[in-house]
Image: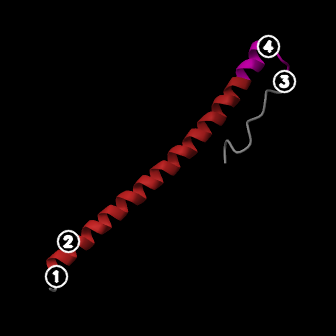
Amino acid sequence: MIPDPLEVALVAMLSMVLAGLIAAGVTISVQLIKWKIENQRLWSWNRALQDHIYRGSPPPPPSAPPGLFD
């Protein structure tokens, strides 16, 4: 039995939609991981700045962690 062209087109379209959703999910996951790492670096630098101010340490203030503003 030969499938109808409409069925083939429908399966192809659904496959493309599924592939797009998977790609979008992977992209979002990667971006969230990068955001979390950047957020942790920023938090640690802000904590170091607050400790520096609270303790009354002389200048210069602590530098930003490597890779924070890349």
The one of 16 and 56 positioned closer to us in this rendering: 16
Task: Label 4: state its secondary structure.
Answer: helix
Asked if 36 appears above or below 14 in the picture, the reply is above
Residue under the point 36% across and 62% down: 20
According to the image, label 4 marks what residue? 55
Of badges 3 and 1, the one in the foreground is 1
Mark 4 or 2, nearer chain start: 2
Between the residue at mark 3 and the residue at mark 1, the CA separation in whole angstroms equals: 76 Å
> Which range of residues does the magenta coloring cover?
49-58
Mark 3 or 2, nearer chain start: 2
Task: Label 2: state its secondary structure.
Answer: helix
Between the residue at mark 1 and the residue at mark 4, the CA separation in whole angstroms equals: 77 Å
Q: Where on the picture, by quarter, is residue 52?
A: top right
For badge 4, the amino acid type reads Arg
Residue 3's tag is: 1
According to the image, label 3 marks what residue? 59
According to the image, label 2 marks what residue? 10
Residue under the point 47% across and 54% down: 27
Of badges 3 and 2, the one in the foreground is 2
Q: Tags 3 and 4 in contact by the CB under 8 Å rule?
A: no
Mark 2 or 1, nearer chain start: 1
The one of 14 and 55 positioned closer to us in this rendering: 14
Instruction: Measuring from the top left, give residue 36's x and y in whole percent.
Output: 56, 39
Q: Tell me if residue 17 is in the magenta stretch.
A: no
